[in-house]
């Protein structure tokens, strides 16, 4: 099945939604009243950006962008682990 025609109208339509979501996430990162709010906004921003990069990879037909999307997702996961460890123990680093 050829996905070209579907992606030709789907990607531009979804791009506007992603830009709106990115803008709202950035506002929450800047104005977030608590640390968990800011962390959640950064998580949402990271995962949405990873999905958007994967969608662009399908649109342009290149597998190289998937590597960046995977690395961004892993970075967001590691960020969550470090923030949760900090919030529990109030210290950074190993151990």
Image (cartoon, rainbow, N blue to C red):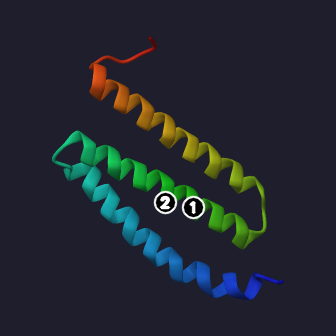
Residue 46: image x %, image y %? 47, 51
Residue 73: image x %, image y %? 56, 47
- On residue 66, the disc is none
- In the image, is 16 to the left or to the right of 64? left
Q: Which residue in the structure is indicated by mark 1?
A: 51
How many C-alpha atoms fall within 10 Å of the one at disc 2: few (<14), some, or many (≥20)? some
Q: Element type at marker 2?
A: helix
Q: Residue furthest left?
A: 33
How many C-alpha atoms fall within 10 Å of the one at disc 1: few (<14), some, or many (≥20)? some
Q: Residue at x 46, y 77 (%)?
A: 16
The Cα atoms of the two marked residues, 2 and 1, are separated by 5 Å
Q: Quadrant of the N terminus?
A: bottom right
Asked if the residues shown at circle 2 and circle 1 are in contact, with their CB atoms under 8 angstroms apart, the answer is yes
Q: Element type at marker 1?
A: helix
- In the image, is 49 to the left or to the right of 44? right
Q: Is residue 83 above or below residue 14?
A: above
Q: Residue furthest top?
A: 95
Q: Residue furthest front?
A: 88
Residue 62: image x %, image y %? 78, 62
Q: Residue at x 73, y 88 (%)?
A: 5
Q: Which residue in the structure is indicated by mark 2?
A: 48
Count of marks placed on residues: 2
**Viewer-nearest residue: 72 or 16:** 72
**Viewer-nearest residue: 13 or 76:** 76
Q: Is residue 61 above or below residue 71?
A: below
- In the image, is 49 to the left or to the right of 29? right
Q: Residue at x 41, y 29 (%)?
A: 82
Residue 70: image x %, image y %? 64, 48
Q: Residue at x 56, y 81 (%)?
A: 12
Q: Quadrant of the C terminus?
A: top left
């Amino acid at each position: 099945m050829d996905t070209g025609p579907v992606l030709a109208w789907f990607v531009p339509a979804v791009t506007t939604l992603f830009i709106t979501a990115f803008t709202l996430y950035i506002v929450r990162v800047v104005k977030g009243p608590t640390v968990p709010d800011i962390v959640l906004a950064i998580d949402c921003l990271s995962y949405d950006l990873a999905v958007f990069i994967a969608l662009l990879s399908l649109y342009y037909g290149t597998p190289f962008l998937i590597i960046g999307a995977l690395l961004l997702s892993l970075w967001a996961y590691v960020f969550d682990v470090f923030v949760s460890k900090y919030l529990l123990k109030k210290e950074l680093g190993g151990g």
